[in-house]
Amino acid sequence: MKKVTKLAVQLLLAAVLASGMLAQANGSADKDKPEAVQTGAAAASSADYVIGADDTLHISVWKEPDLTATLPVRPDGKISLPFLNDVPAAGLTPLQLSASITEKLKKYIADPHVTVVVTAMNSRRIFVTGEVAHTGAMPLLPNMTMLQVLSSAGFTQFANVKNIYLLRTENGKQVKLPFNYKQVVKGNHPEQNIMLKPGDTVVVP
């Protein structure tokens, strides 16, 4: 029985050592990967986002520190990069911009690996004003609704939560959409809890 127990302990120790060596080997392999692979999760989080003016982008080119930088998107929708000068960015997703930069860099670098991550989504903003605790511009998160933005803004004690409204510009005209907070939080009038768009203004009288 003692021999069996001793053998089991030896096998367990061998398994633990093997797993530690495997983890260390995987860690070393990750360091050798291009940055585009290492930051894949970060890039994927904003992969469907459409870049706009005033956004901030982190452009990373593997093994090319001089080409790696954090840049603002200019009002004309372009960014400036060494070798490439002005590169159109607005209207593209990070993956599309990455592919565009990669293609352009092939003239100067062999097999470039480019990662584009949106670090500040300044082009997607909404505005909250009136009897709220936090007025002003607010970043528009994906699928953000009226109820969500009001939860972030908070109300003052004087807020008329039954007569809140949204101001939105459609086809060059301003549209006023009502929002009754008390009814919506009770589950009534779900159609009022619409998803917000860039440039929307929420007014709490």
Image (cartoon, rainbow, N blue to C red):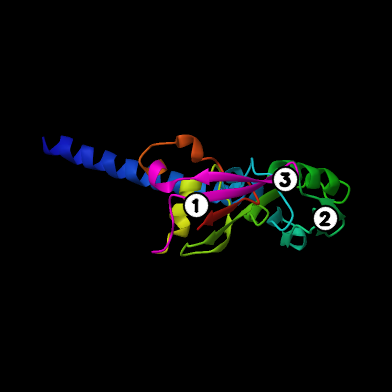
Dot 1: within a 10 Å radius of its alpha carbon, few (fewer than 14), some, or many (20 or more) residues?
A: many
Image point (16%, 38%), residue name = 5
On residue 76, the disc is 2
**Residue 135 part of the magenta-drawn span:** no
Q: Classify mark 3: helix, strand or loop.
A: strand
Residue at the disc numbered 1? 149
Magenta residue span: 157-183
Image point (57%, 44%), residue name = 177
Point out the residue furthest to the left here: 1
Pick whichever of labels 2 and 1 is earlier in the sequence.
2
Q: Classify mark 2: helix, strand or loop.
A: loop
Percent of width and height locating residue 108: 87, 51
Dot 3: within a 10 Å radius of its alpha carbon, few (fewer than 14), some, or many (20 or more) residues?
A: few
**Left-right relation of 183 to 41:** left
What amino acid is found at the position of numbered circle 3 in the picture? Lys
Residue at the disc numbered 3? 173
- Identify which residue, 17 or 107, lies in the foreground: 107
Distance from the alpha carbon under mark 2 to that under mark 1: 29 Å
Image point (54%, 49%), residue name = 165
What amino acid is found at the position of numbered circle 2 in the picture? Asp
Percent of width and height locating residue 156: 42, 64
**Left-right relation of 140 to 56:** left
Q: Classify mark 1: helix, strand or loop.
A: helix
Q: Which image quarter is the N terminus in?
A: top left
Percent of width and height locating residue 50: 69, 44
- Identify which residue, 141 or 95, lies in the foreground: 141
What amino acid is found at the position of numbered circle 1 in the picture? Val
Dot 2: within a 10 Å radius of its alpha carbon, few (fewer than 14), some, or many (20 or more) residues?
A: few
Distance from the alpha carbon under mark 1 to that under mark 3: 23 Å
